[in-house]
Image (tube, helix red, strand yellow):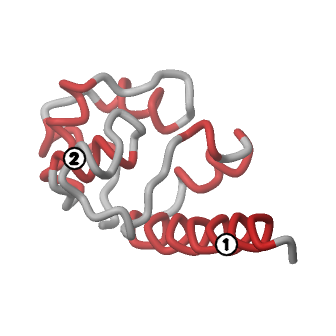
């Protein structure tokens, strides 16, 4: 979804200044903020909590094959740049990175 900070603020009830700090990586969203952002961003709460690294895919009831993003898995620069992209682009990139990580792991395990 292409929302401005003001639009997201109006939909979620989270101040645009706080959203800006989250967007710039100066703050990490709390659980209560994530709950307020889930619906306006088009996420299920569990999905957003999983993408934010609060839940593992299995504890969230999400199949293991779905992309999982934890901020610690990415270089901070890449995470910052990715955060500026629309949600659909973020999901695609996370999916691609998950696939590549899985391929690399399987190649390491098989000794190729």
Q: Residue at x 23, y 56 (%)?
A: 41
Which of the image's four quarters has the C terminus?
bottom right
- Residue 26 percent coordinates (x, y): 55, 23
- Residue 49 percent coordinates (x, y): 29, 41
Which one is nearer the viewer's eye here, 40 or 8? 40
- Farthest right residue in view: 112
The residue tagged with tag 2: helix, strand or loop?
loop
Which of the image's four quarters has the N terminus?
bottom left
- Image mark for residue 30: none
Give the mark nearer the N terminus: 2 vs 1: 2
Give the vertical position of 15 relative to 93 (above or below): above
- Farthest front residue in view: 110
Q: Is residue 21 left or right of residue 75?
A: left
Give the vertical position of 32 relative to 89 (above or below): above
Q: Do the CB atoms of the residues marked 2 and 1 lie less than 8 Å apart? A: no
Rendering quarter of residue 71: top right
Which one is nearer the viewer's eye here, 37 or 94? 94
Give the vertical position of 106 relative to 10 (above or below): below
Q: Which residue is mark 1?
A: 100
C-alpha span from label 2 to label 1: 23 Å
Q: Residue at x 62, y 68 (%)?
A: 102
Rendering quarter of residue 55: top left
- Image mark for residue 60: 2
Q: Residue at x 35, y 43 (%)?
A: 56
Rendering quarter of residue 99: bottom right
Label 2 crowding class (10 Å Cα cut-off): few <14, some 14-19, many 20+? some
Label 1 crowding class (10 Å Cα cut-off): few <14, some 14-19, many 20+? few
- Residue 52 percent coordinates (x, y): 40, 40
Q: Residue at x 37, y 26 (%)?
A: 17
- Residue 81 percent coordinates (x, y): 65, 52
Which one is nearer the viewer's eye here, 53 or 60? 60
Which one is nearer the viewer's eye here, 28 or 61? 61
């Amino acid at each position: 979804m292409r929302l401005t900070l003001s639009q997201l603020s109006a939909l979620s009830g989270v101040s645009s200044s706080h959203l800006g700090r989250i967007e710039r990586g100066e703050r990490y969203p709390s659980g209560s903020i994530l709950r307020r952002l889930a619906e306006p961003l088009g996420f299920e709460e569990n999905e957003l909590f999983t993408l934010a690294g609060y839940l593992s895919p299995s504890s969230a009831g999400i199949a293991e094959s779905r992309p999982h993003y934890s901020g610690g898995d990415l270089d901070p620069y890449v995470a910052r740049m990715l955060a500026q992209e629309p949600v659909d682009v973020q999901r695609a990139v996370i999916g691609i990175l998950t696939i590549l990580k899985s391929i690399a792991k399987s190649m390491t395990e098989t000794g190729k």
